[in-house]
Image (tube, rainbow, N blue to C red):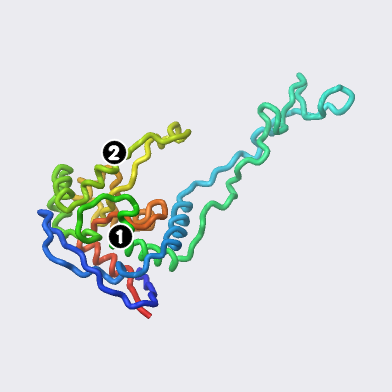
């Protein structure tokens, strides 16, 4: 599906470097128009909230939790509070009794998903793509890199030529993004709070996003276990990849064919 992005401005061309398998800048290329549109931080934030809440699983209590009891009030004349009691005199059922039901338990009917229009989501993704070409946004996210121009585009041969993590590290050092992977590794830390006991013990920062044509290629396999790295294809690329936490400016590496596929998916129409 092709999304048309309406922009009430004339778009200026933005150039970047194309890197070879050896990590050398081969030539300058002109980026698609989608990388030149204005960055809408407010829309990106709203789109991220929509995508993030869509993944949440509703949580609720059993409607009869704490209510399965034969306790009945004894009435007046016993010198006791008129709460439901068992034959042995122990209070039950009520909120303040041990084993009683909760006062206001969470219900699965609660609406968690923040909905957003499809065209708004498409514009937010396009705007987040434009932020990947802006050094100010990328540096504001805390990424560390040595590249002259963003985003970084590499030739398609990289996907099949590089098959080992050792070779991938050397390649990332040459194109100037390995320092960001090291930054993510140093910042891995233990989570504060009870999340440590619930399967999310560690917090790992986001580093480089690789947009490739095949997520099962040798290059994708060699970099997928690096700290903070995400792998996406033009069809799976979403706002969670491009703007983690709702903050635009993810350090991104595209392959040439993936860049063309993204450009063909999001068309810019200047009004």
Please indicate, yes or no, whether residue 252 appears anywhere in the rendered image: yes
Instruction: Tell me which residue sits at (36%, 61%) in the image.
Output: 128
Of the pair 118 and 9, the residue shown nearer to us:
9
| Vertical side of 83 occupied by 89: above or below | above
For the residues labelled 1 and 2, the Cα–Cα distance comes to 23 Å
Residue at label 1? 132
Q: Position of residue 148 (x, y in %)?
A: 19, 59
Would residue 236 be seen by someone viewing this image from the given angle?
A: no
Q: How many marks?
A: 2
> Residue 212, position in %: x, y?
24, 57
Which residue is at a point 28% across and 74% down the rendered structure image?
A: 12
Residue 125 appears at what percent x and percent y? 37, 62
For the C terminus, give its image quadrant: bottom left
SS assignment at label 2: helix
Residue 65's tag is none
The one of 259 and 134 positioned closer to us in this rendering: 134
Q: Nearer the viewer, residue 83 or 178?
A: 178
> Which residue is drawn at the image coordinates 31% and 69% (left, top)?
36
Give residue 235's quadrant in the image: bottom left
Up/down of 149 relative to 209, above or below: below
Numbered circle sitting on residue 186: 2
């Amino acid at each position: 599906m092709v999304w048309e992005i309406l922009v009430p401005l004339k778009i200026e061309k933005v150039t970047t470097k194309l890197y070879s398998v050896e990590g050398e800048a081969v030539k300058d290329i002109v980026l698609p128009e989608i990388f030149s549109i204005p960055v809408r931080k407010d829309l990106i934030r709203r789109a991220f909230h929509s995508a993030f809440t869509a993944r949440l699983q509703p949580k609720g209590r059993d409607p009869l939790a704490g209510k399965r009891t034969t306790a009945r009030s004894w009435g007046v004349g016993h010198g006791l509070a008129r709460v439901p009691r068992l034959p042995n005199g122990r209070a039950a059922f009520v909120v303040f009794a041990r084993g009683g039901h909760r006062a206001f338990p969470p219900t699965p009917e609660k609406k968690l998903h923040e909905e957003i229009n499809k065209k708004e989501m498409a514009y937010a993704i396009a705007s987040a793509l434009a932020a990947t070409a802006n050094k100010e946004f990328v540096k504001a996210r805390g990424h560390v890199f040595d590249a002259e121009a963003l985003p970084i585009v590499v030739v398609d041969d990289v996907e099949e030529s590089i098959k080992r993590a050792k070779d991938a590290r050397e390649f990332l050092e040459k194109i100037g993004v390995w320092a960001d992977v090291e930054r993510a590794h140093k910042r891995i830390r233990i989570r504060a709070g009870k999340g440590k006991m619930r399967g999310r013990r560690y917090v790992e920062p986001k580093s480089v996003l690789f947009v490739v044509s095949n997520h099962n290629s040798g290059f994708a396999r060699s970099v997928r276990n690096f700290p903070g790295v995400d792998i996406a294809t033009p069809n799976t690329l979403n706002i969670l990849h491009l703007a983690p936490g709702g903050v635009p400016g993810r350090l991104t590496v595209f392959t040439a064919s993936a860049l063309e596929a993204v450009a063909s998916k999001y068309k810019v129409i200047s009004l």
